[in-house]
């Protein structure tokens, strides 16, 4: 029953939701789910907030059905299956999602259609610049820019911040994430605007160093990064010395932890960038990127990677030694030695260095050989204004800032480890929590 206006920074709405890969979470409610989320959040989220998330995320599927969608289970469900309570983490995607990676776009269209059906006003190309507060610190509206002019939009009940993270704010990334050369796969308008506005209004921040961050490729021709996807098991990941340093089939969203190694004596990050190395057999299996995220509408990767070799994005060498020279590795022969050791493990069907499972071991033995530089590439950041179980934004003393709410990845509950589909699931869950409580405010 509330009158709602949506102010959108970009010319086309959707942000990271529209660019998301596939799925949203549903949760089986109960103590097991609570224990699992406590573990993933590393003790940084109060129980009442976890309870609220579980309650509303458990209704996500029914909510999407009420909007006219037909979600179906999407496997695998839990990202951390060995953590207690993992069986309560379920993932879903739209049933008509015939193309892998289109789940976010299809979910966004469903939401957008329902906004239009309800006649909710949406003002695009209208970035909000600051929150307006009364003398007693109530949030009473916003200042927004449209057509080069600043307008004041007054809110009779409340303001909800749902403006994403800071993946494209270089200064904030350097301050909060420490690692150099952290790029992003998502929407370039995510520049931390909501964080700064909330800070100015007196908000506390949380989870500023929490991220969902696989490895990807960054090329100067494109502002956003490309996701990495090697189409077969015949590859290794090596550092700038040419040495393996991780289980290449380990957690997708936590790969940044493996590359965040720092050598203080040399002030050096030896794994940023790192390199995917593969052979001719693997090259011919298909593209080494799905091209998810922002670049999905901008670039089509060649089926055999030949166009990217011609562009110089992928390096080629007739031998590993020749490839190492082109990669400008800082140590002689280490790429050849580490690859030979890996090939030995393939023959023995046991990775004695990093525990890669036997069915993921395939030797690199078919020349020519290839490499592509990889960097930590954000799906999104999780940090922002701290919220409570009602989605109210809190000040540094955990007191609600009157009439200010937040939802989505802006101040997400994911405090350390990220469950796949968790952000879209949280957008649906805390979006409804924020909407209901904001609409219940006294005008």
Image: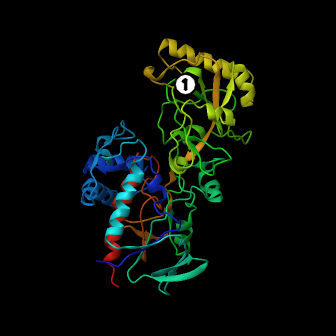
Image quarter (top left, top right, bottom left or bottom right) of the C terminus = bottom left
Q: Residue 305 at x, y = what percent?
A: 59, 32
Q: In the shown orientation, is residue 362 left or right of residue 223?
A: left
Closer to us: 58 or 145: 145
**Which residue corresponds to the image point at 35% horizontal and 41% vertical from the top-left?**
78
Q: In the shown orientation, is residue 424 left or right of residue 126?
A: left
Q: In the shown orientation, is residue 29 left or right of residue 184?
A: left
Closer to us: 225 or 193: 225
Q: Name the image colouring.
A: rainbow
Pointer 1 residue: 284
Residue 314 in which image quadrant? top right
Closer to us: 129 or 264: 129
Q: How many marks?
A: 1
Q: Residue 1 at x, y = what percent?
A: 28, 77
Q: Residue 5 at x, y = what percent?
A: 41, 75
Q: In the shown orientation, is residue 358 left or right of residue 439?
A: right
Q: Residue 163 at x, y = what percent?
A: 49, 64
Most extreme residue toward the bottom, as rendered? 135
Instruction: Tell me if residue 378 can be seen.
Output: yes
Instruction: Tell me if residue 239 can be seen.
Output: no
**Which residue corresponds to the image point at 33% horizontal and 59% vertical from the top-left?**
429
Q: Secondary structure at mark 1?
A: loop
**Which residue corresponds to the image point at 56% horizontal and 35% vertical from the top-left?**
302
Residue 127 in which image quadrant? bottom right
Establish if 189 lies above or below 421.
Answer: below
Residue 426 in which image quadrant? bottom left
């Amino acid at each position: 029953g509330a009158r709602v206006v949506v102010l959108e920074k970009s010319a086309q709405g959707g942000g990271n939701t529209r660019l998301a890969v596939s799925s949203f979470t549903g949760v089986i409610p109960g103590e097991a789910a609570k224990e699992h989320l406590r573990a993933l959040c590393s003790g940084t989220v109060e129980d009442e907030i976890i309870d609220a998330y579980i309650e509303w995320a458990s209704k996500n599927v029914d909510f999407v059905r009420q909007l006219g969608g037909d979600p179906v289970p999407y496997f695998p469900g839990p990202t951390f299956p060995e953590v207690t309570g993992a069986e309560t983490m379920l993932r879903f995607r739209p049933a008509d999602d015939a193309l892998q990676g289109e789940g976010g776009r299809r979910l966004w269209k469903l939401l957008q259609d329902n906004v239009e059906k309800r006649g909710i006003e949406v003002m695009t190309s209208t970035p909000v610049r600051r929150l307006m507060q009364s003398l007693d610190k109530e949030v009473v509206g916003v200042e927004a820019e449209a057509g080069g002019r600043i307008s004041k939009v007054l809110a009779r009940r409340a303001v909800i911040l749902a403006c994403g993270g800071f993946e494209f704010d270089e200064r904030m990334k350097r301050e909060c994430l420490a690692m150099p050369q952290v790029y992003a796969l998502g929407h370039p308008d995510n520049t931390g605007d909501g964080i700064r506005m909330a800070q100015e209004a007196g908000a506390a921040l949380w989870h500023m160093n929490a991220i969902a961050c696989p490895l990807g490729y960054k090329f100067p021709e494109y502002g956003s990064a490309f996701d990495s996807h090697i189409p077969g098991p015949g590859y290794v990941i090596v550092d700038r010395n040419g040495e393996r340093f991780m289980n290449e089939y380990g957690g997708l969203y936590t790969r940044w932890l493996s590359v965040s190694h720092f050598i203080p004596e040399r002030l050096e990050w030896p794994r940023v960038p790192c390199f995917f190395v593969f052979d001719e057999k693997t090259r011919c299996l298909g593209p080494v990127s799905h091209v998810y995220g922002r670049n999905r509408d901008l670039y089509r990767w060649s089926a055999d990677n030949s166009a990217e070799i011609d562009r110089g994005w992928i390096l080629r060498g007739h031998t590993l030694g020749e490839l190492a020279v082109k990669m400008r590795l800082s140590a002689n022969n280490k790429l050849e030695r580490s690859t030979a050791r890996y090939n030995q493990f393939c023959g023995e069907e046991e990775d004695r260095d990093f525990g890669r499972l036997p069915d993921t071991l395939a030797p690199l033995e078919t020349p020519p050989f290839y490499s592509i530089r990889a960097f930590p590439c954000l799906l999104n950041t999780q940090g922002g204004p701290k919220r409570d179980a009602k989605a109210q934004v809190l000040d540094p003393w955990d007191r609600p800032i009157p009439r200010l709410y937040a939802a989505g990845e802006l101040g997400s509950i994911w405090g350390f480890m990220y469950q796949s589909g968790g952000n879209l699931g949280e957008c649906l869950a805390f979006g409804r929590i924020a909407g209901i409580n904001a609409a219940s405010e006294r005008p």
